[in-house]
Image (cartoon, rainbow, N blue to C red):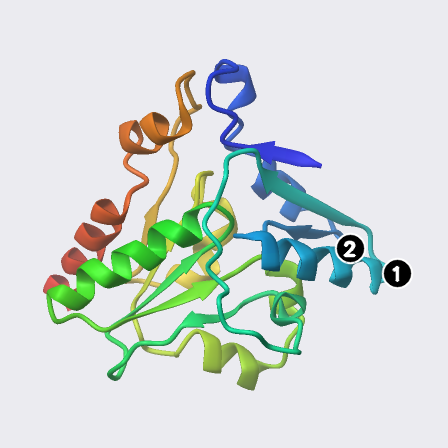
Amino acid sequence: MLFRSLGEDGPTHQPVEHLPSLRAIPNLNVYRPCDVVETAECWAASLETSSTPSVLSLSRQGLPCLRTEHTAENLSANGGYVLAEAECPRDVTLIASGSEVAVAVKASYLLKEEGVSAAVVSMPCLEKFEAQNQDYRDQVIKPGTPVVVVEAAIEQSWGRYLGRNGKFVGMTTFGASAPANDLYNHFGITAEKVEAAVKEILTDI
């Protein structure tokens, strides 16, 4: 188990490189669920994968339950899926994992008020998503649509999805010691920063 956003335990407990480092290990599934439903799904998916070890990266903080609609399918087993589709044709795709999925959802509401149509993709496991066929991946991350990724880690894992016009909202330094919400505001991992990144992309296109 790897725990993120530990808050007030000091900067040595605020790793920004652990997720990318784990994702670089061959034949290892790294799960970072966004809420209690995804946590159960990721646990089930890890138990059903006998040939591949798994890591569950969990949050110590309380997180909102974002999966409010019941489905019999284990969506997290696909690695990534559309948590909230845009109401109109997509202007942008917001991708996040773990705690930052809630940030992306809030950003989509802010963008909607500005007339920008954003879909939110939850990506609990990059390795499982990469194992899906191209048609499925294209349904989740529409080709040709700008992408903004938000994650409380360094950008390394996400370059393949950002493309030429994409933006990453995350970490470029080590963390600090403070309550989790203060840290997110300090490092700019907020819905407002995601909104600003989207506006910058759409202005440049």
Q: Residue at x 47, y 16 (%)?
A: 8
52 or 190: nearer the viewer: 190
Q: Are marks 1 and 2 in contact (CB under 8 Å)?
A: yes
The secondary structure type at the circle numbered 2 is: loop
Where in the figure is residue 100, as x and y percent of width and height? 42, 48
Relative to 143, say whether 102 is above or below. Answer: above
Give the residue type at disc 2: Asn
Residue farthest to the right, as pictured:
50
Question: Pointer 2: what residue?
Answer: 27
In this view, the mark in front (1 or 2): 1
Where in the figure is residue 111, as x and y percent of width and height? 19, 63
Relative to 187, say whether 52 is above or below. Answer: below
86 or 146: nearer the viewer: 86
Can you tell which mark lies on residue 51?
1
Give the residue type at disc 1: Ser
Quarter-of-image position of residue 147? bottom left
* Label located before the other in sequence (1 or 2): 2
* Apparent side of residue 85 relative to residue 110 in the rendered image (left or right): right
Where in the figure is residue 88, as x and y percent of width and height? 24, 83
Label 1, label 2: how far apart the Cα atoms are: 9 Å
Residue 125 visible in the picture: no
Relative to 93, say whether 179 is above or below. Answer: above
Image quarter in which the C terminus is found:
bottom left
Can you tell which mark lies on residue 185?
none
The secondary structure type at the circle numbered 1 is: loop
